[in-house]
Image (cartoon, rainbow, N blue to C red):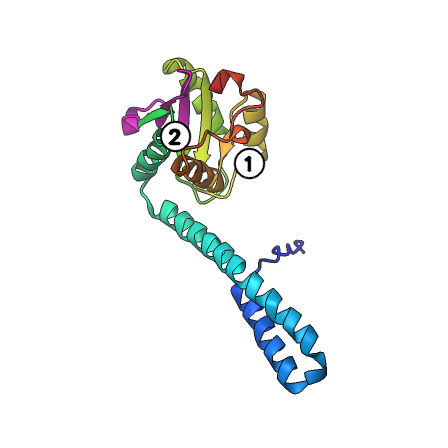
Amino acid sequence: MPKKTTQPHQDHPSHWVAVIILALAVAVVMPEFRQLAGLLFLAGLIGLPFSWMAFQKRKSRTLALRDLQLLTPRELELHVARVLDALPGWSAHATRGSSDQGADVIAITPNGKKVAVQVKHYRNNVGNKAVQEIVASKAIYQCEHAVVFTSGPGYTKAAIELAKANRVPLWVPADLFRIQEVAEQKGSMPRELLPGSTSGWLG
């Protein structure tokens, strides 16, 4: 039988609402525990707004992922280009669709390095063919670096091994959302999304 995986516990605002209600009930029903009830009530008031903000952020991420999956392959390529282009000092544009030679987006870093990006509109794991194609496209577009992005859950073991050997970052939706957030804050590309040595990317 396949091993069941357990989902990590995620805080929910309703948990803190329950704490507040419990505190009020304790204060009314058991007056001798009013001090404890007061502490519970205070904890609920403090925890509820933070829990609500975290809940809204998770909800927006879920909606954003659904939005990505609803895009057409071409729309997804254009979206990735826009996200990269919004990074301070970066520029990016989508290539011409079917004649892209494996690179769907060409980006230029703040220090002038060209990056070829292949965008895969997948619902399953991406195989190593995508990595092979983007590595080959580096020479065609005279790029120093290459990246693969997927709207799906991730990559096969073979793809991960080949990407590691060729120093090709493999991005998933969470990475694109992270870049988008950084761009909105006028920050720099997260270094963990770049190859092991970042000097060639950022100067």
What are the residue bounds of the magenta stretch? 94-118
Mark 2, Cα crowd under 10 Å, few <14 / some 14-19 / many 20+, is many
Q: Which image quadrant is residue 5 in?
A: bottom right
Q: Is residue 94 left or right of residue 13?
A: left
Could you say which is closer to the camera, residue 172 or residue 53?
A: 53
- Disc 2 element: loop
- Disc 1 element: loop
On the image, the x and y values in percent for residue 51 come to 53, 59
In this view, the mark in front (2 or 1): 2
- Amino acid type at mark 1: Thr
**Considering only order in the chain, which callout, 1 or 2, is on the residue closer to the N terminus?**
2
Q: Which residue is mark 1?
A: 156
On the image, the x and y values in percent for residue 138 come to 42, 17
- Amino acid type at mark 2: Leu
Could you say which is closer to the camera, residue 89 or residue 64?
A: 89
Relative height, residue 114 to residue 157 (above, below): above
Q: Which quadrant is home to the N terminus?
A: bottom right
State the residue at coordinates (52%, 30%).
193
